[in-house]
Amino acid sequence: MFNKKRTKRDRSEGWTKRKKFRTCSLLARAATRSGKKILKRRMWRGKHELAPGDYCNYKMRKVKSLR
């Protein structure tokens, strides 16, 4: 069938943060030649978040100052 979801951006039931980490993390990007090009381009553009797949513990997130 032609309508099966088989791409890297698949967000179906079995999708997990770990699967995203395998393809979109900083380690995964820096390990390949094309991934280094992606990181270089994002750094040149001034992006603060170079790799969207890096897991961030929500309990350790930065908090806004009270004042």
Image (cartoon, grey):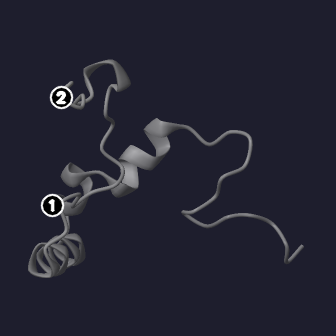
In this view, the residue in front, 7 or 53, is 53
Q: Which mark is residue 40?
A: none
Tell me the kind of residue under disc 1: Ala
Rendered residue at 23%/57% (across/down): 49
| Circle 1 SS class | helix
Residue identifier under label 1: 30
Q: Nearer the viewer, residue 55 or 32?
A: 55
Amino acid at dot 2: Ser
**Is 7 placed left or right of 33 in the picture?**
right
Q: Position of residue 62 (x, y in %)?
A: 22, 31
Q: Is residue 55 above or below residue 58?
A: below
Would you identify the image quadrant in which residue 18 lies? top left
Q: Residue 65: horizontal and vertical position, in percent?
A: 18, 28
Mark 2 crowd level (few <14, some 14–19, many ≥20, 10 Å Cα)? few
The residue at which mark 2 appears reads as 65
Question: In the figure, is residue 42 to the left or right of 19?
Answer: left
Q: Secondary structure at mark 2?
A: loop
Task: Identify the residue shown where x is 23% and y is 70%.
Answer: 35
